[in-house]
Image (cartoon, rainbow, N blue to C red):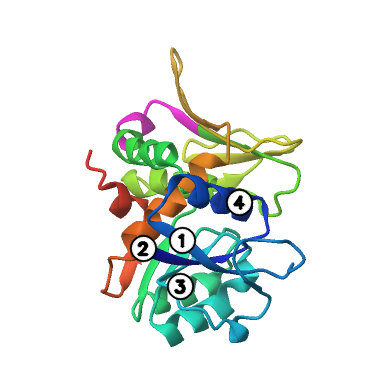
């Protein structure tokens, strides 16, 4: 039995994960939650202060906001437990803390828990350098009107994978305005916020005579919950400090 401490348990993703664990994963149990909102009823206790958590757990799963990172790192290190980070919007200082923490405990981080998005990311690593010379690259991401960070962590993950795979130096920009010709080395990320869009990501390779589009559309939050729970199962078996991601969980090889 994998015992999970769920951070952000009262949010939309926390609710989805809770329901999926209870209905589809008999070998996983959420033993406690951490959230600023403790007025929600769950089948497990909810704490609004990590210092008060007195429940034994195997992994910490975080689906909250970036500002909870510091307290979760302290708790994971104190208990010597794996930390699974699914939040986005981290600052440069946050990323340095994540890097340093991974040297002390097993730490999982992914900007997107979807199996499909991570397969898409691996495809981009393979094709971007081949297409770059003859195609302009643009990224469009769309999310609901309550999402606070822009661009999305997933869009940045895809953009950085594209950049890292291209041998030439490229420039990442965010949106366009004014009167200015597109530079050849630009990779532009466009952000849309509206309604209840769960999460759409599209990478466009635009050539003079053909266009290639690689698209992923989330139609339910269940896909993120499924990936997060699988990450919990995987990380519960990891004992060595280090950085882990969905490639480790899915064992993807292209």
* Rendering coords of residue 212 (x, y %): 43, 21
Task: Evaluate if marks 1 and 4 touch, with contact meaning CB atoms under 8 Å apart.
Answer: no
Label 2 sits on residue: 1
Q: Is residue 171 visible?
A: no
Hey, which residue is sitting farthest top in the picture? Answer: 209
Question: Looking at the image, which residue is at 38% across and 82% down?
Answer: 80
- Of badges 3 and 1, the one in the foreground is 1
Q: Nearer the viewer, residue 175 or 1?
A: 1
Q: Nearer the viewer, mark 2 or mark 4?
A: 2
Kind of element beneath mark 1:
strand
Instruction: Mark 2 or mark 1: name the one nearer the start of the chain.
Output: 2
Image location of residue 50, percent across then percent down: 60, 81
* Residue in the picture at 46% in, 61% down: 29
Q: Are marks 3 and 4 in contact (CB under 8 Å)?
A: no
**Front residue (pair 52, 89):** 52
In-image side of 33 versus 120 (left or right): right
Q: Is residue 14 left or right of residue 59?
A: right
Q: Which range is magenta?
A: 129-137
Question: Which residue is denoted by mark 4 in the rendering?
Answer: 13
Q: Does the residue at mark 2 contact the one at mark 1 (Cβ under 8 Å)? A: yes
* Of callouts 2 and 4, the N-terminal one: 2
Residue on which disc 1 sits: 29
Question: Which one is nearer the viewer's eye here, 107 or 151?
Answer: 107
């Amino acid at each position: 039995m994998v015992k999970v401490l769920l951070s952000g348990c009262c949010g939309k993703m926390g609710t989805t994960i809770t329901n999926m664990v209870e209905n589809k994963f008999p070998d996983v149990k959420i033993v406690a939650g951490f959230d600023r909102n403790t007025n929600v009823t769950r089948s497990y206790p909810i704490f609004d202060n990590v210092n008060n958590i007195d429940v034994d757990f195997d992994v910490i799963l975080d689906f909250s906001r970036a500002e909870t990172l510091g307290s979760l790192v302290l708790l994971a290190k104190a208990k010597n437990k794996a930390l699974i980070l699914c939040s986005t919007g981290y600052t440069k200082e946050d990323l340095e803390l994540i890097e340093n923490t991974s040297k002390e405990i097993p730490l999982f981080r992914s900007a997107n828990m979807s199996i499909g998005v991570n397969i898409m990311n691996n495809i981009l690593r393979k094709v971007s350098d081949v297409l770059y010379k003859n195609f302009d690259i643009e990224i469009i991401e769309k999310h609901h009107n309550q999402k606070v960070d822009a661009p999305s962590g997933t869009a940045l993950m895809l953009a950085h994978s594209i950049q890292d795979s291209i041998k030439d130096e490229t420039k990442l920009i965010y949106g366009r305005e004014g009167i200015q010709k597109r530079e050849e080395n630009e990779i532009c990320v466009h952000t849309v916020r509206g309604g209840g869009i769960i999460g759409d990501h599209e990478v466009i390779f635009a050539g003079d005579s053909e266009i290639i589009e690689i698209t992923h559309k989330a139609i339910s939050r269940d896909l993120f919950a499924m990936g997060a729970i699988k990450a919990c199962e995987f990380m519960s078996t990891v004992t060595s400090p280090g950085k882990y991601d969905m490639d480790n969980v899915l064992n993807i090889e292209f």
